[in-house]
Each structure stands twice: as structure tokens, then as C-alpha cells.
Amino acid sequence: MSTIPQTDLSRLASDIKRWGAELGFQQVGITDADISQHADKLKQWLAKGFHGDMAYMAEREGLRNKPDELVPDTVRVISFRMDYFPDEQHTAERLQQPEQAYVSRYALGRDYHKLIRKRLATIAERLREAGGEHCRAFVDSAPVLERGFAEKAGLGWIGKNSMLINPKAGSWFFLGEIYTDLPLPTDPPQESLHCGSCTACLDDCPTGAIVAPFQVDARRCISYLTIELHGSIPEELRPLMGNRIFGCDDCQLVCPWNKFAEPTTEVDFSPRHKLDQADLLSLFAWTEAEFDRNTQGSAIRRVGYARWLRNIAVALGNAPPNQDTIKALEEKLGTVDAVVDEHIRWALQRQKDESPRPDRQ
């Protein structure tokens, strides 16, 4: 346990927030390490099987509830918020342009993991210099209930779509944490603004993944289907995915709180390789070498070339019939693997089917 006087700890807490602002974070909050309330909700979510193929969620459940087992003697969790909302070049209008590709806004720029982790590591080192024996930074890199800690630390509240919502910034931001053994003064949670009677996110979810307020069945979520799922996308969900090839923003696009979001000033989060303007056929034509080159330093790299093509094939199957599309699909058959071929054949059947479909009206 730290022997640093309380006055020094208060001063250090103020320094942490100043350091955060200097390193590009829009908000910093500090809370204790008790996450039991959110851990109970996670247990219920896992019991329903809502995590799908994300076995790691269940395998490391215990560590999420016990921060001091992940980092010894943890008594405080420092949460950091960094906004990523880009300018309006990439809008919801793309969802109404079926030949165009929709990539989730968070993935348009450079991968946030390394950028944020490097900056948090700088602060963690300063905490060690100030007397903290155990201080470790995390950015989606360990079993951390980041939204739960961020809510407790006053960075916002968890909305009906399970996203953390801030009254001044909406939900277009990344989160990062530092676990520490320093007993810093804590911050209060946000005032109870919350979602009220609004059900926009539930009503607008393309696949009905938000099965009830605050409950998301990942097995139906397009972000899960396009990023986490390694095998075949359930056929009944494919027509509902539209042109979304990596992630989904629909529940954020309709959230009233996001009207307060300001464009990010972080240059690295600006769209790269014109992914905010790309059409499906151009991206489907990438070779594996082009995919590796164009996704270097991007969160998109994690899905790999095969899943990238699988996702685009589904989107092409949802696009209006076109001979160029049929030709591109046929040329890719047999070039990658059986899963990609399955989705290409599905897309070809859709492209060659002249009968009206509800999702084309």
C-alpha cells in the first residue's frame, strides 16, 4: 500500500488529468477497482450465449471481476477517453448507396490500439516514478470491463445499445485504462441523464441484435459477424447486412446524443486509402498483397484477407444486379478458401435472381 500523503495523491490526480489532456485525451476519470455490478451483468450475458464464438469472453471472465489478479494490488482504475469522430465525408448516406462500401468509422484511420497504448504507457511510467509499484496500461488488450470502469469514473453512462455515452461527446470515442496501486482520490459518476424513453438504437439495428434495452446478442450484431466470426455468416442475416463490410455504426448514427460529437483533431484517425469513399468492386479486387499493404497500421488488418473478401461478397450479393459484379465474383471463385467460395456462390445466386426482394425495394 502506498505511503504517499493524501495531499500529494490529490495533486497527482490533477497531474494525471493534465497529462491526459496534453497527450490528446478529452477526458480522464478515476474510480475504485470494484466492478462487481458490471461483472454480474457480464455473467448473465454469457449465460445466455450472447458472446457467440468469442470464447475468450467466458474463459477470462474471472479476471474481469478481479483487477488485482491482473495487476497486483490494484486499487484504482484510471479511465481515458479519446474522441475519434471524423468529419462528415463518411456519412449515413453511404448506407443508401449499395454499390459503395461502408466501413465503421472507428476503423477508417490508423489503428487506435497502438496510438493510445503508447500515450498511456507514458503516463503509467510517470506514475511509477511518483511511487506506484504496479501501474499498467490497457487498450482492448486484456480482460478489462472498460465501459463499466469508465461509467464509474464519470466518463458517461452505458446506453441501451451497450455503448458508453457522454453528454458532450456522444459515443464516438475510444477508451483506455491504467490499473494502479496508488490510492488516488476518485471521481463521481455522471449525473443521471441517460437514455430516457428513447429506443432509436433498438428500432434501427439492422439485424435486431439489441434484443432488449442494454442487451446485445453479439451473434446477430454486424460488428461481430464481420470482425469476430471466423466461419460462415448465417445465411438469414446476410441480406440484412447491406453494404456494411467491417463493423456497423447504425446504433450510433441514430443516437440523439451524438449530435453533440465534435470532429476529432487527431490526424491519425483521418480516413486512409479513401476507405470512406471506396466502392465494393474496387475493394473486392484487392490482391492479398494489396490488402496487407493497404491495411498496414489499420484495425482492419485483424480480419485477414479471407474474411475481408467474405464480407465484401455478402455486400455484393446485396447490391443491385450488375454484370461487372457477377464477373468479379466468378473470377474470385476457387482462389481463397471454401468459406469465401460459399459466400461468393450465395452472392452470385442473389445477383442472378431477377425476382424482387424486400431488401432491394
Image (cartoon, rainbow, N blue to C red):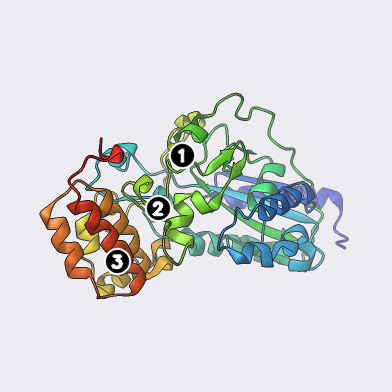
Mark 1 surroundings within 10 Å by alpha-carbon count, few (fewer than 14), some (14 through 19), many (20 or more): many
The residue at 77%/64% (across/down) is 132
Earlier residue among tags 3 and 2: 2
Q: Find disc 1 in the rendering and name its residue.
A: 205
Cα gap from disc 3 to disc 2, whole angstroms: 15 Å
Give the answer, above or below, for where 358 lies relative to 6.
Answer: above
Estimate the x, y position of residue 263 in percent, counting from the top left.
41, 40
Q: Which residue type carries mark 2?
A: Phe
Q: Find disc 3 in the rendering and name its residue.
A: 294
Give the answer, above or below, for where 77 lies relative to 132.
Answer: above
Q: Is residue 193 visible?
A: yes
* Label 2 close to label 1 by CB (< 8 Å): no
The residue at 65%/51% (across/down) is 79
Look at the numbered disc 3 and give the secondary structure of its residue: helix
Estimate the x, y position of residue 266 in percent, counting from the top left.
42, 50
Q: Which residue type carries mark 1?
A: Cys
- If the image is split into quadrants, where does the N terminus sit? bottom right
Mark 3 surroundings within 10 Å by alpha-carbon count, few (fewer than 14), some (14 through 19), many (20 or more): some
Cα gap from disc 2 to disc 1, whole angstroms: 25 Å
Estimate the x, y position of residue 6 in percent, counting from the top left.
85, 50
Outermost residue on the top side: it is 197
* Mark number displayed over residue 269: 2
Relative depth, front residue between 257 and 169: 257
Q: Which residue type carries mark 3?
A: Asn
Look at the numbered disc 1 and give the secondary structure of its residue: loop
Cα gap from disc 3 to disc 1, whole angstroms: 30 Å
Relative depth, front residue between 135 and 86: 86
